[in-house]
Amino acid sequence: MNAPVDIEPSVLFEERTAHNGKRIGIATLNAPKTLNGLSLEMATLLTERFDAWADDEDVAVVVLQGAGEKALCAGGDLHGLYRSMREYREAGKTDIRQNTYAAEFFEVEYRLDHRIHTYPKPVLCWGHGIVMGGGIGLMSGASHRVVTERSKLAFPEITVGLYPDVGGSWLLARLPDHGGLFLGLTGALLNASDAIAAKLADWQLAEADRETVYTELLSTAWKDDDAVNATLLAELLGGRAVTPEPGPFRRHAAHIAQLCSAGDLDAVIAAIHADTSDDPWLKAARDTLVAGSPGSARLAFELQRRAKDMSLAEVFRMEYGVSLHCAAHGDFEEGIRALLIDKDRSPRWNPATQHEADARWSERFFTSPWNGADHPLADLTPKHS
């Protein structure tokens, strides 16, 4: 008889007691082999425990981190979504709600992201290593967001036929000087300094200081007031923060603003394509746009345009419908196939050109099968910028 195989939980939960009896809740994404890619199970477990900690008056602070040295979270469950998209297509289904796995995955993920944005207690997210896609969704809403010298953040969805979701439309639309549009179109990589500049993080600390910070959490005199505890946590982190040198996103801010100044997507893309800068960071961004899905570029543009005047809750509801449309008849399946399944890195985008992926083409992605109150995310409460 074979010995039973011990299966590690996909999320590890721990509580540490501070000197004054208050507790620190620590959630660790525990799938380092997949760079802590966010699965439906992980999102469900996080939601349940975050809800429990929110109701526990003795929990002063919640910490979110990733196992291993490489990533907080590199994205969502693309393999599971790929299988569900193939099954949906092969079954000849036409209602986007009939992709039951995608519908559940995006609902649970977006609810969790919104929960973190509106969480009543301080949430410290230690964003080391790779933070992309679903990882951005988890980290961006935390009240106290730390990056380190190892951090690499990006919205790379254009490479897989999606768009910057998980509230990315709301986040990027609020960056000045068209910086959000550039990031959404190019998947440009952000280091720690640039993550702070892009309002995706608050402090840069040394990775070597992580356990020291966690030890200091236990010696802090936490109170019964969440706002006071948020201030205490900010002071603790600020005392160890370093002032990073400006990264390429900050250094090229004026150039990015010029490239993306036109109100028309085709003109913006033409300007980026024609850019002759020999800066490696700008060249990598341009190459990603050139190789990426034209449909994804259009959706990123249209979503940010709409999100400017919407609450976060409204944006999540909008993104939910668009994401299910992407799973039904967008480039999402093809992008995952080319990157992760066949690994030929030769996606056949449809539409194949930016001219074909015009505003009229994108209209069906914003057609909702729900009528207000019956939307799966109808009960999310507004959070205005």
Image: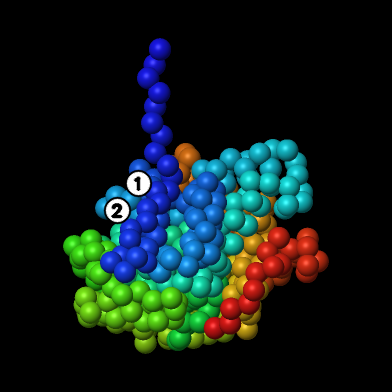
User: Viewed as shown, does residue 77 lie left or right of 193?
Assistant: right
Residue depicted at 73% across the width and 38% down the height? 91
Residue sticking out furthest to the top:
1
In the rendered image, the quadrant that contains the C terminus is bottom right
- Nearest the eye: 154 or 383: 383
Q: Looking at the picture, which amino acid does disc 1 mark?
A: Pro
Residue that carries the numbered disc 1 in the rendered image: 32
Q: Looking at the picture, which amino acid does disc 2 mark?
A: Lys
x%, y% of residue 15? Answer: 37, 56
Residue sticking out furthest to the right:
371
Task: Kindly report the distance in space between the C-alpha atoms of the residues bearing marks 1 and 2.
Answer: 8 Å
Residue sticking out furthest to the front:
20
User: Viewed as shown, does residue 100 lie left or right of 144?
Assistant: right
x%, y% of residue 125? Answer: 38, 66
Classify mark 1: helix, strand or loop. helix
Classify mark 2: helix, strand or loop. loop
Q: Is residue 108 above or below residue 271?
A: above
x%, y% of residue 264? Answer: 58, 80
Q: Label 1: how many residues lie within 10 Å, few (<14), some (14-19) or many (20+)?
A: some
x%, y% of residue 273? Answer: 44, 72
Write down the quadrant of residue 114 in the picture.
Answer: bottom right
- Nearest the eye: 238 or 39: 238
- Nearest the eye: 150 or 269: 150
Residue 160 in view here: no
Q: Are discs 1 and 2 less than 8 Å apart at CB?
A: yes
Q: Name the N-terminal-most of marks 1 and 2.
A: 1
In the rendered image, the quadrant that contains the N terminus is top left
Write down the quadrant of residue 322 in the picture.
Answer: bottom right
Residue 309 in view here: yes
Residue depicted at 50% across the width and 82% down the height? 174
Q: Is residue 341 above or below residue 193?
A: above
Residue that carries the numbered disc 2 in the rendered image: 70
